Amino acid sequence: MRDWKRKKGIRKGGDSDDVVITKYTISVDTARAIKKAVPTYGSQGRALQVATEMLIRMEDPPEPEPPAKDEPVVRVSVRLRKRTYELIRQLSGKYGDDTGQVIAACVKVLKMKRIKL
């Protein structure tokens, strides 16, 4: 009973130092598109990780969409790696300091058939 932490179900180490849990305000259509990508990538955070890595390497990234005033929005909580979180913050400068626009661009990248890097 001395080594009780090593029993099944209780992990010895974790990745909490490398993970950020944050909320983003995005459109409902964008939220649906991210949830649709989950079976392919495993989670919402992983889908955004792949999309942001492709987005920073693109020569011609997708243009920001004009914000629609009557479009419904939702707050989405996402578990991201620190690098992905920082990339989204960096890319928000190109998209009018709006992280929702960055995530919408990530969805566009995930939907692209051919990507020119």
Image (cartoon, rainbow, N blue to C red):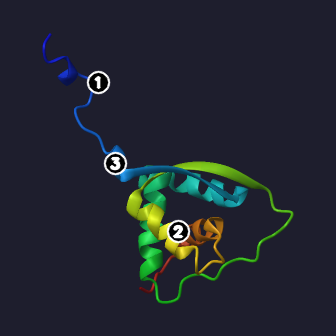
Q: Mark 2 and mark 1: span between their CA atoms?
A: 35 Å
Up-down relation of residue 88 to residue 56 (above or below): above
Dot placed on the residue nearer the N-terminal end, 2 or 1: 1
Depth check: give the residue in front, 18 or 42: 18
Up-down relation of residue 17 to residue 87 (above or below): above
Q: Secondary structure at mark 3?
A: helix
Quarter of image, res 2: top left
Classify residue 14 as left or right of residue 39.
left
Question: Which x, y percent locates residue 55?
Answer: 48, 76
Q: Which label was assigned to residue 54?
A: none
Up-down relation of residue 2 to residue 16 (above or below): above
Depth check: give the residue in front, 92 or 116: 92
Q: Which label was assigned to residue 17?
A: 3
Q: Which label was assigned to residue 9?
A: 1
Question: Residue at point 46% right, 81% down?
Answer: 115
Question: Residue at point 53% right, 75% down?
Answer: 91
Q: Are marks 2 and 1 in contact (CB under 8 Å)?
A: no
Instruction: Report crowding for label 3: few under 14, some 14 to 19, many 20 or more residues within 10 A (C-alpha).
Output: few
